[in-house]
Image: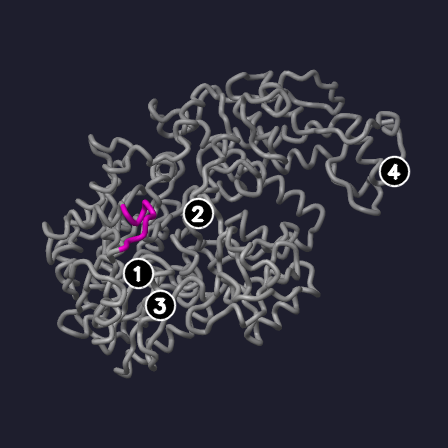
Amino acid sequence: MEEKYYAHSIENEIPDKWQSLEEHLYNVGELAGLFAATFNSSFWAKTTGENHDIGKGLRGWQAWLRRVNDVKDGFSEFYTGHVNHAIHGAKRLFEFSPQAGKLLSYCIAGHHGGLSNWSEDKQTSLKSRLEEQLPEIKFPLKNPKLENSLPLKKIEAERFGFQLQFFVRMIFSCLVDADYLDTEAFLDNEKSAWRLTYPSIMDLYDRFFKNFTEMRNNSENTHVNRQREIVLKDCLEAAKSSSGLFSLTVPTGGGKTLSSLAFALEHARLSKFKKRRIIYVIPFTSIIEQNASVFRDILGEDAVLEHHCNFIPDDSDWKTRLASENWDAPVIVTTNVQFFNSFYARKPSKCRKLHNVAESIIIFDEVQTIPVEKLKPCLEVLKELTLNYGVTAVLCTATQPAIKYSENFKSGLKNVTEIVKDIPELFGALKRTQEDFIGKSDEPDIANQLINHDQVLCIVNTRRQASNLFELLPEQEGNFHLSALMYPKHRSNKLSEIRDRLKQKLPCRVISTQLIEAGVDIDFPVVYRAIAGLDSIAQAAGRCNREGKIKQGQVKIFKFEDEPSHSFFRQTSQCAEELLSRFSGQLLEPECIHEYFLNYYWHNEHRMDKGEIVEKCLHGFRGDIQFKDISKFQMIETESIPIIIAIEDKAIDLVKQLEFIEYGTLVFRKLQQYTVQIYPYQIDALTGWLETPKPGIFVLSSPELYSDETGLISEPPEGEAFVV
């Protein structure tokens, strides 16, 4: 009797309705090859797909598949339990080619569990697994054909190890996404059909310029808006350039968000560049929804996919898995953390989306916020994407960091084209503030100065400073406190109230942490800023006289007698202080900002790659890649934990819904407006006050621990917490 080999079974269906192994291998090979065509690697990915599951051709694996489906046939006698099938395809390719086959063996061996180290302990290293004696596969196999050279457009000898591991990870991405999609299409055709059909880049181009033109036509003919038109014109002109690295240096309030999107759509429209999507990378989760909302308003609800880490429900929810792993929408809005972590990850769920980054336009908003300890690994990703994967990257900020290649910084970026034609002219035209250093002060003195202003914003470096200053203000209408300990909807309500008071010329004094610097559109005549890095001071100045409605706003920089001991605040403040007298009155000029970053990076170049991740990548130049070691890279060392604040009726109702739904993606999305991010050590202080309606989901429903003025109280009041 002819032996029939299957890749996937269907519950309660006879084997004749199962997916054959031959069909699955063919489908995955074709789909993976299609994905890799974006970086000229179809043959490599197709070969990987055609061989990834040949281990299912073992009689023992076929016997296991039949046993779990209670099917008895001629394979039953070969049953020995569950058989690990992934290593078989890996070993076969390695035996055919210890070079190309070796690279592809990482992908096949790891397509379920993740990319392994080449050498480690005997149980888990790929090298030792490839040395195992394996049973013979009876399923008919074709001899693979493997390439003799890498398909990369440009190989750089000094970076070859990095390029090699990056290439393997991109092929891995093509394989696992193709495997997921083909399996889903067979097992749940209805679910597969539910996948959204997104509008094309040309559709988005038409939508954007129709709405953007209408928006501009309805705007006031102010000096600031005229400068924004100049920025837009420069962006549209630069979009005609070839693919590569760009910088967009625009003062805060200069309209860079929508102008950069205009650049991306115009650049994508030009068919010779073959751009498939736009990825907007934002530094803070606190503003990702705000920017995504702006894009939806101008592009449409169906065009934009958000991906951030506030909530990641069960992976069995296909919609959430699509959002977090696949990235096949035309516009993606994500975070630095999500973006860069993915390019050093090893797990299939984290790497699945990577191939969809090829041939995209990536806009990095506030690029200067990349932590100095992670700078080199992030720059290496940018270099490789623009060098070999058809990516155009735009570095957007008012304070361009000094990350271009130089004799003193050979890890920097080469061939970066500035979009704005006359930066000094633009900065001069958009200068709307006078910045002065007023020296050292204590909290009571600063509080007294704030009282003397009817409308004033004061930004400090820590939550404790913000809380202390707020407590020192006399109790009166018009005093506000803002911090990340307030859930987003609460902050939004406060910001709406603040904007209304500013508009009506009513007293309005705001004490805030630096969260208000992250893209919050607000306009004060006077801003106080505790000494910090010049990039932070520039962001603070962007909240002062933002629309240029008064002759000159006042930015007053001060230093607390007792500054935070945190090394980041100390170092950035020191580097800024060194320039205060030399660039008095010109602190926000591009020349001063450049000097600041040169100084800051010079002090910190020795720690620009915490964990020596790039060095680990370079060591794999012979193909001996340590993927598990490389995956230790994390943009943020300590991830925060979301706490749902369920004290509003709407939040209480949404939390109740969690008890009756299996996955709740839509509910989780709505609950993001009621969440506060805290660090793991803070959870201990809330023990006994938190409910857990689902595993890993924490809810605070006690108003005793949440202040309408300052947000979450991180430590419970005296007395015992109630039991929940």
- Does the magenta-highlighted stretch encompass residue 569? yes
Labels 2 and 3: the sequence-earlier one? 3
The kind of secondary structure element at disc 3 is: helix
Q: Which mark is residue 71?
A: 4
**Residue denoted by label 2:** 337
Instruction: Determine the residue positioned at 24% across, 67% down.
Output: 446
Q: Amino acid at mark 4?
A: Val
Quadrant in the rendering for residue 126: top right
Label 1 to label 2: alpha-carbon separation: 24 Å
* Region in magenta: 562-570
Q: Nearer the viewer, residue 706 or 488?
A: 706
Q: Is residue 496 left or right of residue 560?
A: right
Q: Which mark is residue 460?
A: 1
Q: Amino acid at mark 3?
A: Lys
Q: Amino acid at mark 1?
A: Val
Q: Residues within 10 Å of mark 4 (few under 14, many from 20)?
A: some
**Residue denoted by label 3:** 210
Q: Which circle, 1 or 3, is nearer the viewer?
A: 1
Q: Which circle, 3 or 4, is nearer the viewer?
A: 4
Q: Nearer the viewer, residue 692 or 102?
A: 692
Q: Are marks 1 and 2 in contact (CB under 8 Å)?
A: no
Is residue 718 placed above or below 28 in the rendered structure? below
Is residue 551 placed above or below 606 in the rendered structure? below
Labels 1 and 4: the sequence-earlier one? 4
Instruction: Determine the residue positioned at 87% across, 29% down.
Output: 76
Label 2 to label 4: alpha-carbon separation: 47 Å
